[in-house]
Image (cartoon, helix red, strand yellow):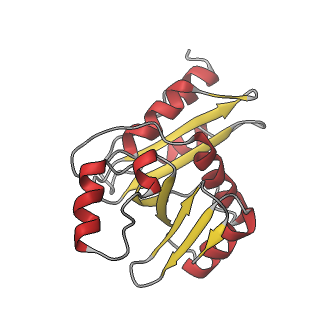
């Protein structure tokens, strides 16, 4: 029988958005002192549920699983996401009582090539976006009012937080504290 820690470390799910595995969700409850993220990439349809922090340290396999789902979907380039950003996501989940639901990812890592194309076509994309450093993410939480997500993210004072109601996402980053 597989030990709980080994199971949790390997619990990545790459599945179609309609695939549901309720038994796995019950089995993979986080133990005290563990931090788990459940993400859904809106562009690739991939999902992941993984423990990324336990026993006082980050878990490399969990971080690797998250980095893959948060990759640049335009060219499949993977980068290391800032672990502090992942902790902020976990804290937003906790503040909103969203611990067992998927965070929808609009944008995680963005390669310099992708960012340059987006910047050329939009005023809303910074030339030196923190997405290129793996320090920014754009999210939404199905079933939660976007204003509540924005308010919860700002309350953490963990970095920049942007509110984009027309595009239905909240931007979070680990830069200096600022709001827009």
Which residue is painted at 57% across and 46% down in the image? 37
- Does residue 100 lie above or below 149 as drawn? above
Name which quarter of the figure residue 12 lies in: top left
| Residue 100 placement (x, y as % from top left) | 60, 54
Q: Going by the picture, which residue comes out furthest to the top?
A: 1
| Rendered-image quadrant of the C terminus | bottom right
- Nearest the camera: 162 or 56? 162
Q: How many marks?
A: 0
Q: Is residue 78 visible?
A: yes
In this rendering, position of residue 115 left or right of residue 7 = left
Name which quarter of the figure residue 98 lies in: bottom right
| Residue 75 placement (x, y as % from top left) | 21, 46
| Rendered-image quadrant of the N terminus | top right
In this rendering, position of residue 86 left or right of residue 129 = right
Q: Is residue 73 visible?
A: no
Which residue is painted at 23% across and 68% down in the image? 120
- Nearest the camera: 67 or 115? 115
In this rendering, position of residue 107 left or right of residue 27 = left
Q: Going by the picture, which residue comes out furthest to the bottom?
A: 166
- Nearest the camera: 53 or 101? 53
Q: Going by the picture, which residue comes out furthest to the front?
A: 127
Which residue is painted at 40% across and 47% down in the image? 70
Which residue is painted at 64% across and 77% down in the image? 148
């Amino acid at each position: 029988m597989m030990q709980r820690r080994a199971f949790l470390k390997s619990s990545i799910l790459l599945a179609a958005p309609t695939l549901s595995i309720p038994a796995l969700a019950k089995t993979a409850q986080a133990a005290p002192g563990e931090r788990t993220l459940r993400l859904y990439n809106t562009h690739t349809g991939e999902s992941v549920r993984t423990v990324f922090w336990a026993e006082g340290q980050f878990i490399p396999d969990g971080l690797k699983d998250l980095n893959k789902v948060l990759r640049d979907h335009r060219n499949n380039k993977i980068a290391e996401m800032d672990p502090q950003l992942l902790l902020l996501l976990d804290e937003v989940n906790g503040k909103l009582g969203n611990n067992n639901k998927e965070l929808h990812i609009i944008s995680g890592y963005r390669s310099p090539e992708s960012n340059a194309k987006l910047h050329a076509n939009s005023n809303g994309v910074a030339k030196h976006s923190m997405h290129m450093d793996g320090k920014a993410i754009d999210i939404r939480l199905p079933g939660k009012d976007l204003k509540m997500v924005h308010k919860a993210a700002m309350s953490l004072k963990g970095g920049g937080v942007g509110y984009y109601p027309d595009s239905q996402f909240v931007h979070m980053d680990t830069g200096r504290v600022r709001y827009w």
